[in-house]
Amino acid sequence: MNAGPSGFNNAPVTKAFVIATALFTVFFGIRSGSSNLALSYQDIFEKFRIWKLIISSFAFSSTTELFSGLYLLYFFRVFERQIGSNKYSVFILFSGAVSLILETILLSLFKDPTANLLTSGPYAVIFASFVPFFLDIPVTKRFGVFGVPFSDKSFIYLAGVQLLLSSWKRSIFTGICGIIAGSLYRLNIFGIRKAKFPQFMASFFSRFALPSLSSHSQPPRRTSPNLGRQAVRAFRAPVPSTTEPSEEAIATLVSMGFDQNAARQALVHARNDVNAATNILLEAHSH
């Protein structure tokens, strides 16, 4: 399993979202505490605290949640690289909106004006991302620890469980709403997976905060075999391995949008190192 090259290369929407989450948490979440940011029936149906809806969508209420959440958001940048920044922005907006609707319905069912039922933070985007993570990201390595089987995906699941249980039922409810939102996106409700922001909106945002929404930063294009060979020659990696690349490693690169033949060639030249192979293929796009 691999999330591609390190950093926020080809993932500026994720970068903006991570920065916004960190800033909102520092200035509103940690200072205010979980009790002040958690959503309640009173906030929505009696006092109409719209500002709290916005802040609670970004700000975690504790440092522990912040670290776990930012780690997961950073890892899930692989999906922005796979579908492109424009569609990933739609995914964020859709999962946030659907999760908020579900949370509002949940609050209306309990009708307890004193209980802070739902914790704050971008749980919608994080747990919606676990749906494609479970279904689309293949396992590339399996190992055991004291006889207990693990895979290279286990650490992401463990981080998710830790975040899901961080505020007990308040975070569990919010996480489940995010999973449902991600499932609806996966089912392509209303054709949402084909939706994009209009070009004029993409151009507008490209001048300010989200440069990759414009047409010049589309997801990785399918790499032709010739381009893959050119990248291999340009990269000058070590002597190619004689071992045939694993199907899991090839599937990982293909899931990021690369051509299967080019991915196979890159893995051979990179001695089956998925990180190095990804760099080879990205190098091809820069030429």
Image: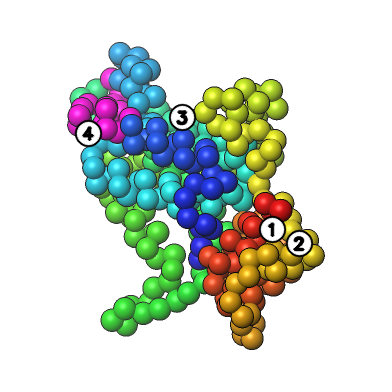
State whether residue 237 is above or below residue 124.
Answer: below
Q: CA distance from mark 4 to mark 2?
A: 49 Å
Q: Amino acid at mark 1?
A: Ala
Q: Earlier in the sequence, mark 2 or mark 1?
A: 2
Task: Identify which residue is drawn at 52% across, 28% down.
Answer: 209
Judge depth for marks 3 and 2 and give the one in front.
2
Rendered image quadrant of residue 233: bottom right
Q: CA distance from mark 2 to mark 1?
A: 6 Å
Q: Any magenta on residue 74?
A: no
Q: Amino acid at mark 2?
A: Leu
Q: Amino acid at mark 3?
A: Ile
Per the image, label 4 sits on a secondary structure element best described as helix
Q: CA distance from mark 4 to mark 1?
A: 44 Å
Per the image, label 2 sits on a secondary structure element best described as helix
In front here: 21 or 60? 21
Judge depth for marks 4 and 1 and give the one in front.
1
Residues shaded magenta = 24-42
Task: Identify which residue is drawn at 30% across, 20% down.
Answer: 43
Q: Which residue is mark 4?
A: 30
Q: Earlier in the sequence, mark 3 or mark 2?
A: 3
**In the image, residue 136 lies at what x, y percent?**
58, 59
Q: Which residue is mark 2?
A: 227
Task: Identify which residue is drawn at 66% across, 33% down.
Answer: 214
Q: Which residue is mark 3?
A: 101
Q: Earlier in the sequence, mark 4 or mark 1?
A: 4
Q: Amino acid at mark 4?
A: Ile
Q: Earlier in the sequence, mark 4 or mark 2?
A: 4
